[in-house]
C-alpha cells in the first residue's frame, strides 16, 4: 500500500475544505460532526493543508438533490487553486455512483483531490487504475451498506405482513395507533367506521352511482381523517369500495394477505359491490408461462422501444418439434420495418462480455486485502453509529420521564402530554428500527465483500451456472444499459466492472 499512501510529490492542492456529514437532523445532536471535524483538522495539519472552509452536511447521501453537497461543489469551482476535499471516508462523500461523473470530471481537470482519512488514500488526476479502482470499491461498499439496510427494512415489512400487520396509513374508517407495548397497530375509527360501512351497504343496492355516493357521504358527514379533513371525492369513494381491507384482507403489490384487524363488512357485501361496479374489476395483466431472460432489459437502438420476446415452434417432417425464442426489434436501416433476432445469438454476446470481466490474480489479492481493511472500517463505523443511536434513545427516554413529571405537576395538559409523548415514542420506534438494521447490516458486510470478489473473478462461471432469474439479476448488476442495434448488442457497464473489461492487460493493472 506504500505506493498509494506515499504520494505527496504527486499532489498539487495546498488548500482544503473539510467535509463532514451526518445522515439525519436527529444525529446533529450527537458528537459525530465534532468528532469528524477534529480528526480531519488533525489530518490537514499533518498534510500541511490550509483549511479554508468547513462544510457540515446534515442530509441523506441517498435521497434528494443534496443541496448542501452541490453548494460545496459550487464553492470548489469558484476557487482558482486546486482544492483538497478532505472527508473521513468514502461514504461521507457518496454512497452511490450518482456523483461519480461530477467528481471525476473535476479530478481530471486538476480542480480537486479527494482525501479519505480513515481509508488512508487520495484520489487525484494522476491516480493509477488501482487507486481509482479502490475508490470505486469504496463506493460499492457504501452502496452495499445502504442496500443492506434497505433489505433489512424490507424483511421487517415482510415479516409484519406475514403476521397480518399493516405497514402504511390506515384506510378511512380505521386509525393508526400503538398497542400496550408501543408497537404500531390499527384500530377501528368509531366515528367514521359506521359511515364507511353504510357506504358499502348503499352502493351494493345498485341504485346509486359513484357520484351519487359522494353526495350521500357529504349528507352523512363523512370526511377524510388526514390533512384538512375535506369531503370525499369520487376517486376516493371508488378506492374505498375496491379496498379488500374492509372485509379482512390487505392488498400489497396486487397480492392479498389476511390481516389481523377488525373487519367492517362481510366479504359477501364487498363482492356485491364489485358486481355492481361493472368493468372496474379487470384482471391484472400476466406474463405468459415462459419467463424471458431479457424481459424489460433491452431497448431497440433504432426506435428506443422495449425489445419484446416470443417463442415459435417448428415442426419437422419426422414428427419432431423445436422451440426457439426470438427478440422483436426494428431494422436500423429502416426503423419502420420490424425484425426478429434469435435470443441465443444475443445471449452469446452477453456471455462474451462476462468472459471479458477478468481480474489478474495479483490484483485480486491486493483487492482482497483492501476489502478486508474496508470491512474493518465499516464495522467500526457501525459501532460508532450504534453508540450515537443509544445516546439518542437515552436522551428521548429522559425527555419522556421529564414529560411525565410535568404532567403530574400540572404544568402540561393531558392533551399536550399525549401529543408530545406520541411524537417522542415515534422517534424511539424509529431509532429502534435503525439499530436493528445496523445490527443486521453489521453481519452482512463480509458476505457482500466475498460476493463482489466472486463476481469480479468468476463472472462467466457464475453466469453460465445460474437460473434465468439469477442471470437477469447478474445482468442488472453488470450492465448500465442494453440496446439491440439490429443483431448487435450494444451496452455500457456499471462501475467498476467497466474497469475490469478495459484493463485486460496485466501490465496496466500493475
Image (spheres, rainbow, N blue to C red):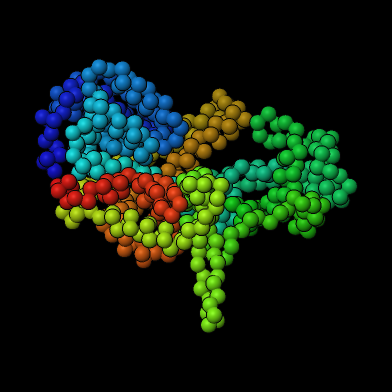
Q: Position of residue 410 (x, y in %)?
A: 57, 26
Question: How many callouts does the rendering have?
Answer: 0
Q: Is residue 313 above or below residue 178?
A: below
Which residue does the image show at 55% across and 31% down from the upper left?
420
Q: Position of residue 448 (x, y in %)?
A: 32, 53
Q: Is residue 121 above or below residue 253?
A: above
Left or right: 171, with 325 as reference point: right
Left or right: 150, with 202 as reference point: left
Which residue does the image show at 60% across and 52% down from the upper left?
252
Front-most of 383 and 476? 476
Front-most of 339 and 510? 339
Front-most of 440 and 43? 43
Q: Is residue 446 visible?
A: no
Which residue does the image show at 17% across and 46% down from the upper left?
508
Which residue does the image show at 70% across and 31% down from the upper left?
229
Give the quadrant of the N terminus.
Answer: top left
Front-most of 50 and 149? 50
Q: Position of residue 180 (x, y in %)?
A: 57, 47
Q: Is residue 81 above or below residue 263?
A: above
Q: Is residue 195 visible?
A: yes
Q: Residue furthest right?
A: 207
Q: Residue furthest front?
A: 333
Q: Position of residue 482 (x, y in %)?
A: 43, 49
Left or right: 236, with 357 as reference point: right
Q: Is residue 181 above or below residue 228?
A: below
Left or right: 154, with 198 as reference point: left
Amino acid at each position: 500500500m506504500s505506493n498509494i499512501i506515499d504520494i505527496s510529490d504527486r499532489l498539487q492542492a495546498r488548500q482544503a475544505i473539510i467535509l463532514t456529514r451526518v445522515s439525519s437532523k436527529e444525529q446533529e445532536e450527537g458528537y459525530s460532526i465534532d468528532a469528524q471535524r477534529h480528526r480531519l483538522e488533525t489530518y490537514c495539519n499533518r498534510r500541511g493543508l490550509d483549511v479554508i472552509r468547513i462544510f457540515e452536511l446534515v442530509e441523506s447521501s441517498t435521497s434528494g438533490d443534496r443541496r448542501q453537497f452541490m453548494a460545496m461543489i459550487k464553492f470548489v469551482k469558484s476557487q482558482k487553486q486546486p482544492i483538497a476535499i478532505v472527508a473521513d471516508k468514502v461514504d461521507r462523500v457518496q454512497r452511490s455512483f450518482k456523483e461519480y461523473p461530477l467528481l471525476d470530471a473535476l479530478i481530471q481537470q486538476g480542480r480537486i483531490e479527494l482525501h479519505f482519512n480513515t481509508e488512508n488514500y487520495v484520489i487525484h488526476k494522476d491516480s493509477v487504475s488501482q487507486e481509482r479502482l479502490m475508490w470505486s470499491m469504496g463506493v460499492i461498499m457504501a452502496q452495499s451498506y445502504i442496500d443492506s439496510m434497505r433489505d433489512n427494512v424490507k424483511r421487517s415489512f415482510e415479516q409484519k405482513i406475514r403476521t397480518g400487520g399493516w405497514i402504511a396509513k390506515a384506510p378511512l374508517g380505521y386509525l393508526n395507533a400503538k398497542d400496550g407495548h408501543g408497537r404500531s397497530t390499527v384500530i377501528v375509527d368509531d366515528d367514521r367506521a359506521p359511515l364507511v360501512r353504510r357506504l358499502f351497504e348503499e352502493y351494493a343496492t345498485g341504485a346509486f352511482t359513484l357520484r351519487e355516493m359522494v353526495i350521500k357521504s357529504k349528507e352523512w358527514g363523512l370526511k377524510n381523517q388526514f390533512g384538512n379533513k375535506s369531503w370525499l371525492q369520487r376517486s376516493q369513494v371508488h378506492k374505498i369500495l375496491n379496498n379488500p381491507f374492509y372485509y379482512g384482507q390487505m392488498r400489497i403489490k396486487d397480492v392479498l394477505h389476511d390481516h389481523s384487524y377488525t373487519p367492517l363488512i362481510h366479504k359477501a357485501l364487498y363482492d356485491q359491490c364489485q358486481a355492481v361496479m361493472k368493468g372496474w374489476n379487470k384482471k391484472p395483466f400476466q406474463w405468459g408461462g415462459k419467463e424471458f431472460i431479457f424481459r424489460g432489459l433491452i431497448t431497440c437502438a433504432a426506435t428506443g422501444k422495449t425489445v419484446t420476446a416470443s417463442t415459435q415452434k417448428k415442426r419437422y417432417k419426422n414428427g419432431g418439434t423445436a422451440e426457439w425464442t426470438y427478440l422483436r426489434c426494428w431494422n436500423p436501416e429502416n426503423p419502420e420495418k420490424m425484425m426478429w433476432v434469435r435470443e441465443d445469438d444475443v445471449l452469446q454476446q452477453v456471455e462474451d462480455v462476462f468472459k471479458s470481466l477478468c481480474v489478474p490474480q495479483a490484483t485480486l489479492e491486493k483487492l482482497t486485502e483492501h476489502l478486508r481493511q474496508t470491512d474493518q472500517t465499516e464495522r467500526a463505523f457501525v459501532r460508532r453509529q450504534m453508540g450515537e443511536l443509544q445516546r439518542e434513545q437515552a436522551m428521548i427516554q429522559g425527555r419522556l420521564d421529564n414529560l411525565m413529571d410535568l404532567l403530574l405537576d400540572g404544568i402540561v395538559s393531558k392533551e399536550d402530554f399525549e401529543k408530545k409523548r406520541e411524537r417522542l415514542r415515534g422517534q424511539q420506534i424509529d431509532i429502534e428500527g435503525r439499530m436493528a438494521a445496523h445490527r443486521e447490516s453489521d453481519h452482512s458486510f463480509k458476505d457482500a465483500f466475498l460476493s463482489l470478489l466472486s463476481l469480479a473473478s468468476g463472472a462467466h462461471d457464475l453466469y453460465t451456472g445460474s437460473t434465468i432469474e439469477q442471470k437477469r439479476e447478474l445482468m442488472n448488476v453488470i450492465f448500465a444499459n442494453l440496446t439491440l442495434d439490429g443483431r448487435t448488442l450494444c451496452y455500457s457497464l456499471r462501475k467498476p466492472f467497466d474497469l475490469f473489461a478495459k484493463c485486460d492487460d496485466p501490465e496496466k493493472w500493475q
